[in-house]
Image (tube, helix red, strand yellow):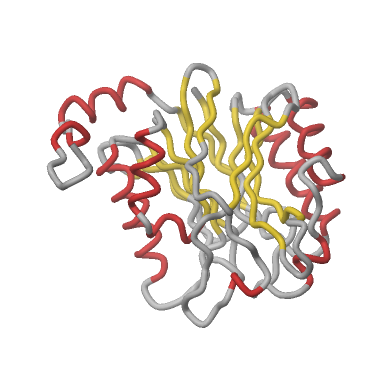
Amino acid sequence: MRIALGQLRSGTDVAANLAAIAGLVEEAAGRGARMVVLPEYATYLKKAVDETFPQVAEPLDGPVGTELGRLAALHGVAVVAGTVEASGTPGRAHNTLVVHDADGRPVASYRKIHLFDAQGYAESRFIQAAAEPTPVVFDLDGMRFGLLTCYDLRFPELARSLVGAGAQVLLSCAAWVPGEHKLRQWQALSTARAIENGTYVVGSCQAEPISIGHSLVVDPLGATVAELGTGPSLAVVEIHPELIATARQRFPTAAQRRLPGQE
C-alpha cells in the first residue's frame, strides 16, 4: 500500500492553505498513493495558538471539511488533515484530525488529547482537549491506522493503546515547534514508537519556519525509509504489512509485558 507524506507551510490564509493541500493531494494521487497524510493545523496555522483559532473554527462538515472531502473524492485518495474544529465553548476550539476516504466520506476524526503546554506555549488557553481521551483508529485497504497529534508522540501510552485497538500504522500529524534538540527528539520519538510497537510511524510535520519540517516514515524495525527536508514537499512510501508481522514475531513484546495491568 502506498502512502503519501505531505509537508505544508500553512499560514493564516485558509483558502491558500486549501489550495496547497489540493496540489499535494493531486500529486499524491498521480504517484499512486492510496492515502495522503497532512500535518497538524494544515488548514490554519500561526506561530502560537491564539484567539483567532476559535474565530476560524468550523464544524467538521463546514466549508473546510467539505473541501477536504471533495478533494479526496476528486482524486480517489484518502486524506488525513489537521483542522480547527468548533467546540461549542466560547473562545475555545478543538485541534482535530479528520479523515476522508477515497469517496470523500468522513470516516474518522480525532481531537487532540495532550495539548502543548510546554516550551513557553499554552495551547490549552484556546484549544479544548478531547473530553473523552479515547484512541481513534480507522481501516483502509485491509489495514488499520491510529491517529496521533504532535505532542501526543511524547506519550507512549497513547501509541500502545492505538496498537491495542489493532493499529498497524501510526499516523503522527505535527507542527513540531523548533528548539534545542527538537529535530533529534522528533526523530527519536518517532523511531521509538515504531520499534516498541512493531508499527510504521508516518510523521507529517509542518515546514519551517513555524515548525521543523523533516516529515518522516519509520518502519517497524526502526529504519527511516523516508525523510523530507525543511520546506514544502511530498514523499510516497510503500507500506509492507508483512514487515509488521515480521517485527512483531521477532520481538513479541505485546505478549511479554509483565507490569500490573499489562498482562
Q: Which residue is found at the position 59% from the left and 58% from the top?
A: 206
Q: In which quarter of the image is the C terminus?
A: top left
Tell me where residue 81 appears, x and y as whole percent. Answer: 65, 45
Is 50 on the left-hand or right-hand side of 170?
A: right
Q: Which of 28 and 186 is in front in this view?
A: 186
Tell me where residue 48 appears, x and y as whole percent. Answer: 64, 75
Q: Which residue is found at the position 76% from the left and 44% from the top?
A: 60
Q: Which residue is found at the position 41% from the left and 69% from the top?
A: 182
Q: Which of 177 and 122 is in front in this view?
A: 122
Residue 54 visible = yes
Residue 209 visible = no
Tell me where residue 174 appears, x and y as whole percent. Answer: 54, 56
Q: Which of 91 and 69 is in front in this view?
A: 91
Q: Which residue is found at the position 12% from the left and 42% from the top?
A: 258
Q: Examine the rendered structure and indicate whether residue 27 appears above or below residue 88.
A: above
Q: In which quarter of the image is residue 196?
A: top left
Q: Quadrant of residue 124?
A: bottom right
Q: Which of 74 and 82 is in front in this view?
A: 82
